[in-house]
Structure formats: C-alpha cells, structure tokens
Image (spheres, grey):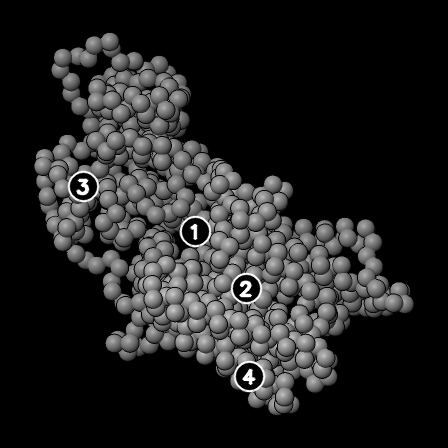
Amino acid sequence: MNNPTSNFQLPTSKRDLAALALIAALVLVFFWRILTPRELDRAAFPPGDFTDQFWMFRVETARAFAQGRLPLWSDYFNSGHPFLADVQSAIFYPISLVWTLAVVAVRGENFSLFALELEAIFHFILAGAFTYLFARRVLESRLAALVSALTFTFGGYLTSYPPQQLAILETATWLPLALLFLDCVIARSEATKQSPPGQLGIASQQSLAMTGAGITLGIAALAGHPQTFLFVIYACAIFYFWRVAQIPNPNDTNYELRITNYELRFHASRFIAIILIAAGLSAAQWIPSLEYQLVSTRAALDWAEAARGFSTVDPLQMILPGFTSAFQSPLYIGILPLWLAMFALFTRRARAIKFWALLAVGALIVSFGFYAFGYALLYLFAPGFAIFRGQERLALVVSFALAILAGFGMREMLQRDVDRRALRRAWALLPMGITISVMFVITLFVSGTVRQSGRVAFLGDRAGLMVLLFTLATALIAARWRARAWRAFAGLALALIAFDLFSVGNAAYNATTIPRFPANEIARALQNDPGIFRVADENQLPGHFGIAYRVEEIGGISPLRIARYDRLRELPEEKLYPLLNVRYLITARPGFENAEIIAEQDKTRVLRLNDPMPRAWFAPFVLVNANDQQVLDVLAQNSTDFWYLAFLAEPPAFPLPAPPVRQPPEKTAHAAEFQHITPEHARVIVNASADGAVVLSENYFYPGWRAFVDGVETKIARANVALSAVPVRAGARQIEFIFDPWSVKIGIAISALTILALIAWRVRR
C-alpha cells in the first residue's frame, strides 16, 4: 500500500504546497459571501444552533475570560447551568481557546458572530488540508489526493449540518489527520520488520507518530461532540487493525500476510497507548462532562430513541441532493466523485479499495438505525453506541470513505497502463447508470411540477442542474476513455467537482445578515430592571437569549440539562414560576389580566407577574421526603405554601421543625438578602427567627456547590426536588455559596501532567 520506509514529513514540494493553497483558496471562494467586505453582498450562517447555541456559548466564554475567570457556571439559562461541564462549551479545545483569547485581547468581551464564522471556515481549510495529506500518502498521487480533499471538504456531509452543529465540524476535522498518523505508526512497524537490526531512527519515528496520533485524537475529543468522536475512534481502530493485518512477512516467499498473536497484542498495546494519550490530554473536559452526564437528561437512552437514523429513501441523496431536506444532503459527494468511486471498484480489486468500499457500506448500514439490523449489533455489543441518538451522523464515515474511493478512481483513470478490458466493463455500466438516473430525475421533475407537494417538489428548481451534471460527467469520462490527454482530464475533473459541490452546497450559507438578537423593546424592558429575577419565555425569543441580553431565564436550548430540574418543570406554571424566581413572562398568549404589561412588540408581550418569590428565602418548617414524585404532587397543590415549607431529600445535620397541624393565623414571609457576586459565588444574609432552612432557587448540582454558614462548611441539601437548601440555626446568618467542583481540578491536573509527560518523553528521546 505504501512504501514502508517512507517517513511522514510535511509537504515541501511546490506542487504539494500549491495543492494546499488551492484548497484554502477554494474554501475562501465557497464562503465568499461571508467574507466579502461589501455590505450589500454580505451573508451569514443561517439562524439556528450555530447562532443560538454555539455563538452564545462562545459569548459567555469570552465574557468570563475578559473578567479573568474560568466559566464553570452560567446563570443565564436553565436556572443555573454547569457551563464548563457541558461538553459543547468546548472551553479547552485548543483552536477555539486561542481564538477566543485573541478576540478578547483585541475586542474585550465582544465576541461577534463573524468571529465564530471565521473559526468554522478555518476548520474547512483544515479538513481539506488533512484529507489531502492523508490521501497523498495513501494514493501516492497529488491529483487523486486533490479529488479526495475536494470531495470531503465540499461534499454534502461537511456543508450540511456540521457547520450548524459547530462541535461536529470541529471534531470531524481531525479524522484524516489521525488516520495519517496511524498509518505512519504501521509504516514504521513495516520498516522495522523489513530492515536490518540496529537501523537508527525507526523507533523514534514510530513513537513520534504515536504521539501525533494521541495528540490529534485528544484535540478531537476536546472539540465538544462525543458521538462524532466515538465515530472517529471506531474509524481509526478499524483502519489501524486493518493496516496491521496488511503487514507482510518478508520471510514468506509469496509475501502473503502473516501476523502472529504476539504481534497483534503488541500493536493493540500501541493503539491503547494512543487512546490513553488522547484521554489524558482531554481529561480537563471529559471528567467534568462525565460527572454531569450522570445526572443529566442524557444519563440513559432507550432503544427507540437511540436507534433513529437515516430513512430507507435517504441514499437517494447520492444522486438527488435535497431529496429529503432542502439544505441537508450529507450523503451527497458529487456526481463525478460517485462515478470515480464506482470506477475504482470495477477496475482494480486491490485490498485498499475493498477496505474503503466495505467501510462506506458498513457505516451506511449502521446509519439506518432501526431500519437495518446492523445498528442493533453495535447497540448491544459495541461500547458507546447505546448512549447516543442520531445514527445518521455516521454520514461522516460514509462521506470520508467515498471521498478516498473517489481518489482511487481518479488515480486509476490517470493510469496509462490501466486494464483496457476493465475500463470497458466499467464504462459500459456508467452510461447505463447515468441514463437511469437522468430518467429518474426527469420523472420526478414532472411529478413535482404536476403536484407541488411532498419530497419531489424541490426538483422543479434543481432537476436541470442535476441533468447538466450527469451530462458533463458522462462527457468527461467518455473523453478520457478515448483520449490520452490526462492533464486536461484532471483539470476538467477538478473543475467539475468544484462546480457540482459549490452549486449544491453553498445555498445554506447565503442567509441575510439580520441581527439575531436586536436591541428591541423587549430586551430593554428586561434590562431596565436592576433586581435579581428570572424570565420565562414561551418560544418568542431565539434560544439562549438570556446570554445575549444578560438576563437569567429558566429555559435554554442546550441538549443537556439536569434531570431533576426537568422533573421540577413538570409543575404547573402557577407553582413553578414562584419557585424559580420568575418575575417576567414573555408570551403571545391572550389572558393574564392580573399581570402588568411592561413591553409589547408585534404579538409578543412582556408581563410582570404578581408576587414573585425572591432568589432566596427562609423556610421555618421542613419535611424529609426523597420520593420526587410524591414531592411534586404536594408542590402542585394549591394549599402548599413555599414560604413556610421546604421538602428535603435527606435529613438535615440537626433537627428542624416540622409544620404544625394547623397553620398559624398570622404568617410573616421570611425573605433573605441574596447577593450575586459571580456565577460561581453568591452570598445570602438572613435573620432567622428560629431554626429552619434557607432555600436557594438555584439548581442543585452535587458535588460542585459548597456552602459556608458563618465561615463553617455546611452540607447543601436538595430541596423541592431540584433546588438547594442549607439548614441554619436561629439568628443572623451569612451563607456563602461557592461552585468549586473537584472534577474540574482533577481533569485539568491530569491534562497538565499528560502534556508535561509527553514533553519530557520527547526531550529524553
């Protein structure tokens, strides 16, 4: 497959550098409307998770960095959220960390949407460059490597939902580089087996390749999408052990594959060492995230939710982009690359071609989820597959494998000694497939024109383009078969691939640059209140508007939430809102005659609710009940008074009074003074008339939060299903709440020690 004695080096030839420059230039052209300085032409990434989730998370991170602190906790959504532990915050991902610090150094805490768009575009350049480097090594052809790089970079996968889900894009980017380093590890093993004893440098080169693979996978793990990282790990493992199986025995006269059990264990130990390096480097993120996962809504998934994937009609995306979604066709790699992949299979039976074909087919079968039995086997026996939903995200592996196959096809097309019979056999099938495909497109076009509904209606706009692409691909392949002008063919092929993928893929990045979080009447009304309160929104504002407007809300669009907090939100509004310190409701519903309207825009109103409860209060009576459902049933009753009664999940450190059988005729509310210092630090001052519990309307997230009553650490109790409480004695008390999770300290320490160990190891060698 490769020259086993060749070393991995960065490309220094002018042609390789020109190829990398071409990839970067094409990425800039693809996103020209994002980058153009001309205001009239400027576009933006479309509204969605990119703007509401990832941009707002980066804004929160930039603010924390500008204040000189690590963003462990956020007050702006979900009534308090363990921000760093949320894996999609990706605070320690090296590229975003350096970029955010650079932006903060120049612009302070004002991290713009354009800054995040630049980060995403940069990852397209990296994905193209890494794919070119890997394909250049595997294919040993610059033009073929360019085909693979363009196909993967601008294909339907990377240009569909990964940019919206920025963590997916940034994780997937590192797959080709990890494969490159793993291939270098195996190449060093081949060189060791075939070289005379005592040859210098090979062991050092192998350890360097192992270190590179571990660092690359560690960076991918920090990018913030565990499911995509799981796919990267499995793809790397499959490729690595397939390459191990290809190591030949030089003592065998037939040069067949020979590997002993000892050698297999030896290579397995090396792969485990690579994984350990990656785990150590990424510990700063995955240890806090694992702690959060155990108490989150994603702690467990059943089969029905985990097994969702592509429908059985989705493979039609390969020839009909947009068939199942207007802007998302993750299986589309382009017409010519698809034919090149088929051409590779028909012209040569090389092991490498079979491997990438089987990898693409296997990943496609698993991506169907419950529609095909393949996923069930992984769900039952493969670690990790049972804890993630959305198996269609395996389009990453399908797309990458097909891109490499397209490179093989291009290499075979450029061969001057290609088997003419195999060429004719492949060519006989290509027009047939093209003819059938074009007829299918025309049929659906007619159907979509006559009946403008369903999945076929889109073809009214795209059918002409697809017919043109089919025709151009047919003519180009026919010309290559009949002529020897391989340079012209290569240039036209690259141009056709770019034209095809640019035409299909960049429509999603032409959104009008309308401010996502404008400074409107609703925002000003909330910001004008200097008090401590929360807001409830009934889907009137974009996700994570709390971060944008610096107001605290009880909702949010982060896919991870504390499970008990979700249980608490089952309460009816009239009971939930007081518990969560909700002062304002943003709604378009009629009614609410008793609430004061403080702002109105179109049909959206901001209502000030009557008698909201404070952020903290003193409850003179407690009941101990660990059954959340029973507590929720009691809290939902109109007779329950939150001011006087708190339900604790476990007995307090000292006895607290239970509620009397009859309520006293006169009741006085016991508010507490809540002082917000930072998201990770709060102070409560209370003058308790008797022993009782100070209830804090903050998410209970044990063991991160610590409480100190008059300087003495006191255990925090879980109150009212999902809130926090501290038992106090009678008298004036000062309570400090500090979020100081050990998981973060341990994770950072492990990552730091791993970096120091790698540096020391390389220095010694």
The percent coordinates of residue 503 (x first, y second) are: 42, 74
Name the residue type under label 3.
Tyr
Could you tell whether 132 is left or right of 444 in the image? right
Cα separation, mark 2 vs mark 3, equals 47 Å
Give the answer, above or below, for where 265 lies relative to 95.
above
Q: Give yes or no for contact between labels 1 and 2 (Cβ–Cβ under 8 Å).
A: no
Cα separation, mark 4 vs mark 1, equals 44 Å
Give the answer, above or below, for where 480 lies relative to 593.
below
Query: Along the polypeptide, which appears first: circle 4 or circle 2?
Result: 2
Disc 2 element:
helix
Name the residue type under label 1.
Gln
Query: Along the polypeptide, which appears first: circle 2 or circle 3?
Result: 2
Crowd tier of the residue under label 2, counting other residues whose Cα lies within 10 Å: few below 14, some 14–19, many 20 or above? many
Image quadrant in which the N terminus is located: bottom right
Q: Which mark is residue 476?
A: 4
Cα separation, mark 1 vs mark 3, equals 29 Å
Query: Along the polypeptide, which appears first: circle 1 or circle 3?
Result: 1
Disc 4 element:
helix
Name the residue type under label 2.
Ser
Could you tell whether 366 is left or right of 675 in the image? right
Crowd tier of the residue under label 3, counting other residues whose Cα lies within 10 Å: few below 14, some 14–19, many 20 or above? many
Crowd tier of the residue under label 4, counting other residues whose Cα lies within 10 Å: few below 14, some 14–19, many 20 or above? some
Query: Along the polypeptide, which appears first: circle 4 or circle 3?
Result: 4
Name the residue type under label 4.
Leu
The percent coordinates of residue 217 (x first, y second) are: 58, 57
Cα separation, mark 1 vs mark 2, equals 24 Å
Q: Which mark is residue 399?
A: 2
The percent coordinates of residue 4 (x first, y second) are: 75, 69
